[in-house]
Image (cartoon, rainbow, N blue to C red):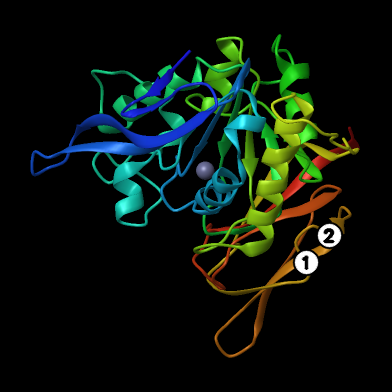
């Protein structure tokens, strides 16, 4: 059966790319999101994949750009539906939030087709996503520095929690954050529709990070083989799981230097970072409140009082 996504249309054993029209820009021209359909030669499950829901998170675009040319529809069982760039307006101006409504796309799901700009795009992509059996929503820690991890956002009491956690483990970045996310995330809204969904967070960078993109490509192929879209074996490895997060802000203004590397284990009371003046005078030392892993840090050293500095993932176990 032919599968259609926007202007892309593929018969079994074919793939096609096209546009999914979602509205008009300020000059009245219509705009569409870049989409791809890979229709496998044999019928099977459907995987939905999207990237750049947050407009400055480009590693996911790098992943899709490398995965698609490696896919041969003749070898695929099932269908892969892809939206290559979700946050159209933010992507144009290399920003995180959609500048048309100053909204974060990953707080707008499941969307509203008569709503704000972000809600309309969310609704259009949610409609496609919810045709699938599995969803991968490729993100990263924006332009902050962050480890490569996969987020399970439905919450531990959700009926799909085990399925989402399984998908995260199969993707296999090595780390999982298993914590109920804020309202409006695709990885929260889609499990409510019965679809296992995870949010791989592929590092954090300005532009593209080679290592994170490589892990993302590997993760997508792990999912494709494990869930039988492709033949082959996936080695599912034990992941380090974090069940919570603690954020640290700057106790004053000045310059931050970190005492720990990203991914390093910290114990309660360990020095995390130092705050100094432009003349190197020490103003403050900030220590960890709990045992955990240094998960994410700001990129720039200068901070004002209260400004975000870093996050420590807590309540760590193996899964
Ligand atoms: Zn994001």
Residue visible at 75% across and 61% down? 262
Residue 308's place in the image compared with 237, above or below, is below
Does residue 81 appear anywhere in the picture?
no
159 to 33, vertically: above or below: above
Which secondary structure, mark 2?
loop
Looking at this view, is 176 or 163 the one in front? 163
Establish if 171 lies above or below 294. above
Q: Does the CB distance between marks 1 and 2 fall below 8 Å?
A: yes
Q: Which image quadrant for residue 241?
A: top right
Q: Which mark is residue 172?
A: none
Give how far across and how far down residue 28 sits, in percent: 8, 38
Q: In which quarter of the image is the C terminus?
A: top right
- Identify the image quadrant of residue 219: top right
- Residue displayed at 63% across by 55% down: 213
Q: What element carries label 1?
A: loop
Q: State the image coordinates of residue 240 (x, y, percent, origin top left).
A: 86, 42
Kindly tell me whether residue 308 is visible in this rendering: yes
- The dot on residue 261 is 1
Question: Is 182 placed left or right of 2 in the picture?
Answer: right
- In the rendering, which numbered label is found on residue 264? 2
Q: Residue at x 69, y 12 (%)?
A: 158
């Amino acid at each position: 059966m032919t599968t259609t996504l926007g202007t892309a249309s593929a018969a079994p054993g074919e793939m096609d790319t096209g546009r999914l029209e979602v509205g008009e820009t300020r000059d009245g021209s219509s705009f569409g999101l870049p989409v791809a359909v890979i229709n496998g030669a044999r019928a099977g499950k459907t995987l939905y994949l999207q990237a750049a829901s947050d407009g400055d998170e480009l590693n996911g675009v790098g992943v899709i750009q490398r995965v698609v040319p490696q896919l041969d529809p003749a070898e695929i069982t099932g269908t892969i539906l892809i939206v290559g760039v979700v946050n159209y307006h933010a992507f144009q101006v290399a920003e995180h939030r959609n500048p048309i409504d100053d909204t974060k796309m990953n707080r707008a799901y499941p969307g509203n087709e008569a709503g704000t700009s972000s809600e309309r795009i969310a609704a259009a992509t949610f409609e496609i996503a919810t045709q699938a059996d599995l969803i991968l929503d490729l993100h990263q820690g924006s332009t902050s520095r962050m480890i490569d991890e996969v987020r399970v956002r439905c919450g531990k009491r959700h009926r799909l929690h085990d399925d989402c956690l399984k998908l995260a483990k199969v993707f296999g970045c090595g780390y999982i954050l298993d914590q109920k996310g804020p309202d409006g995330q695709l990885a929260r809204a889609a499990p409510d529709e019965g679809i296992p969904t995870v949010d791989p967070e592929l590092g954090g960078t300005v532009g593209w990070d080679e290592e994170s993109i490589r892990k993302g490509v590997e993760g997508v192929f792990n999912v494709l083989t494990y869930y039988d879209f492709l033949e082959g074996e996936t080695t599912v490895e034990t992941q380090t799981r974090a069940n919570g997060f603690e954020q640290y802000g700057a106790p004053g203004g000045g310059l931050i230097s970190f005492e720990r590397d990203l991914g390093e284990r910290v114990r309660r009371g360990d020095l995390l970072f130092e705050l100094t003046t432009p003349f190197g005078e020490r103003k403050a030392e900030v220590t960890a409140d709990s045992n955990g892993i240094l998960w994410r840090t700001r990129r720039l050293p200068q901070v004002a009082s209260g400004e975000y500095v870093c996050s420590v993932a807590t309540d760590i176990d193996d899964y």
